[in-house]
Image (cartoon, helix red, strand yellow):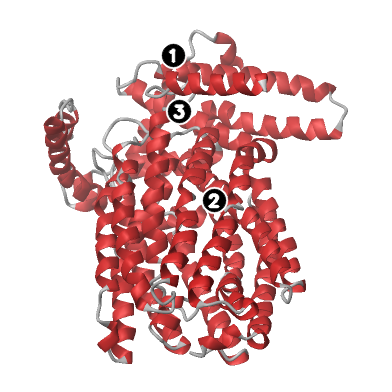
Amino acid sequence: MKISGEKIKQTVSSVKEHWSTPPEGRYIPYKEILAYSVGGIGVKFVIYTVWYISLSATSLLAGSALGLKNGDLVKLNMIATIIGLFLGPIRGLIIDNTRSSKGKFRPYLLYTGIPSAILLTIFAFLPFETMTYNQKLWSLFISYMLLQLCYPFYDQAYTTLVQVMSPNSTERADVITVSTFIYSLAPTIMGFFVPLIAGFTGGLEHINAYRIIMPALGIGGALIGLFSYFGTKERIIVSKDYTPKVPFFKGIGAGIANKYQWARSLTSWCILLQAGVGNVTTWYFYYGIKDVLNLSTEQQGALNGTLMTILGAAATPAMLLSPLLIRKLGKRNMYIFYILGNVITLVGMYLFVEQIWVLYACIWIRGFFNTIPLIADSAMSADVLDYQQYKSGDRLEGLMGQFVGTIGVFVSMGITYFTQTIVMQNHFGLVDNYDDLYKASFREPISKGMILIALVGFVLALIPFVTMYTLTEEEHESHIKVLKIRAALEDYATDSLSEGQLDEAKKIYADSVNEYNECVEALNSASNRKERKKLQSKIKALEIVIDEKDRFATEKMLKKTAKANELLTHTVEELYGISEPTLDKYNEANAMSENTKEEANLKATKLKEASKELDIFHKKAYDYIQARKLIKQKEYYANWDKIFVDEPELQEV
């Protein structure tokens, strides 16, 4: 008890000390973590409420409350998916080319949350009681598509913001863990109160329930979500000069070349086969409990809310254990743990589908495993983006995944058609006969079908993930070190170094060299196979940092620089018929003060005006600019010896 009290005292002391300034080696103060986390509760309120407006017969709103047929909803879902093929890349292009004094993602937390809430409120109060079937169908579809213009920005902005709040992967994972733990209150609160409220308004099969739920959670959530806008800051490791916009197809091409993006995408496509298994919870613990326990509508709502709250509690131990698991297993192994956990629990669900409380226990345990990717997946996304920046020099949060994302859209369409039309509708006969789900004779076979399909998906998912996603924690740490060294080299050459930036780069390289030498010596004397394998992995990662000195001496870079030099033998006028604008206006705007809100707004306006002319030029002469940038970077590396002059022994490595 004494030890526990001392630990609590130390924690409280640390929070007080680092409330406004981060601990050494970290970037994010505690108050910023709290703002991000509390704002997440509001963001998730909005997102989960938007999900009620779904083009699926398994949605209680679309299927039961509005009485829409499964086949019609599948058709509209396919139309929406095709439209999404165009919306996704446009959204990615907008995000990747956002340059605002407020950051790259934070502006969307301000500008897309409230419109989403307003659309939800308007939808809830449409006169569905007097509408024809087709009017209901198209009202749902139009509302759904309008929301696609807002809430994906909102969702992506919040999820991706943590990836640019710190370049430290471990710190990001810690923030994700804390924030997920806090914002998981949103589904827990909704899981309890939504069915409870619905029980006194006719149930979730009636529109009146949504006329309370949608305005309260939509508008309330959007207001709470503002905490994550006003209380956070973005931090990306880049040099301080003008950054040109990324052309659409260049960003797509970068995504195609990213092997880890492919690994994660193939894995996620296999896991999409679990799409139908989530309905089992609704079929058994909304419809099923009323049938098995002979409950009234009010009792059904109260028990459903209680059971959903208990299911939500499965996330708590997973989130508490996640930081320990990430440090012990690594993100990759943690994700494999999640897949294997699903395989085991799905087998249990299939075997005990007729035993409602054993089934409930299996679903609870599966909820524990399904919380893991909330931490691991977000952290891995950030690692893959860091790898992309290390490889190409561009951070492409929006565009990088668009090509594989487009393929994923078609995969999703195929799986939706397979599960909802071929399996649910044609094989098991679920059209608009939702009351049949109250019968065990109808409910059990269709549930077993969904469980089996999900089980196959998770087994298949292991193959691409285990064989293709090989990024280690040590390698990612080296990528971050290299990005810091590159930024220091460039800022050194352009005389724009931050205080301590050069010393940090020198220390990174010196420490890496020393650690490399120690590992090589240890490897030569190591006899244990496990120890040798661990040392070899560490050496491989450290070589990423050490080899950076000779980055432009590799065969690949020699060919690349030769091609760039050939292009630069021509003038911009010869190649593109245009003149290059100067950076004078941009530099003047960038040097403006931003101590007050008015000064910051004026600076943002001037930067936007100055950037417009530059953007037009960079879009047309992108290849030329990239070639010149590459040659400049080569020149920056000529300063390597000057930077490391105090460590002459490093020159010999």
Q: Nearer the viewer, mark 1 or mark 2?
A: 2
| Placement of 608 over or under 87, stated as above or below | above
- Type of amino acid at the residue the image marks with label 3: Lys
Q: Position of residue 289 (x, y in %)?
A: 61, 74
Q: Quadrant of the C terminus?
A: top right
- Between 643 and 113, the residue placed more toward the observer is 113
* Label located before the other in sequence (3 or 2): 2
Reading the image, the residue beneath label 1 is 642
Who comes first in sequence, dot 3 or dot 1? Answer: 3
Q: Is residue 337 left or right of residue 227?
A: right
Estimate the x, y position of residue 318 in percent, counting from the top left.
Answer: 62, 47
Q: Which residue is mark 2?
A: 374
| Type of amino acid at the residue the image marks with label 1 | Lys
**Numbered badge on residue 484:** 3
Location of residue 576 in the rendering, given as x and y in whole percent from the top left corner? 22, 52
Q: Is residue 620 left or right of residue 281?
A: left
For marks 3 and 1, give the one nearer the viewer: 3
**With 569 as the anchor, is 461 left or right in this view?**
right
Label 1, label 2: how far apart the Cα atoms are: 44 Å
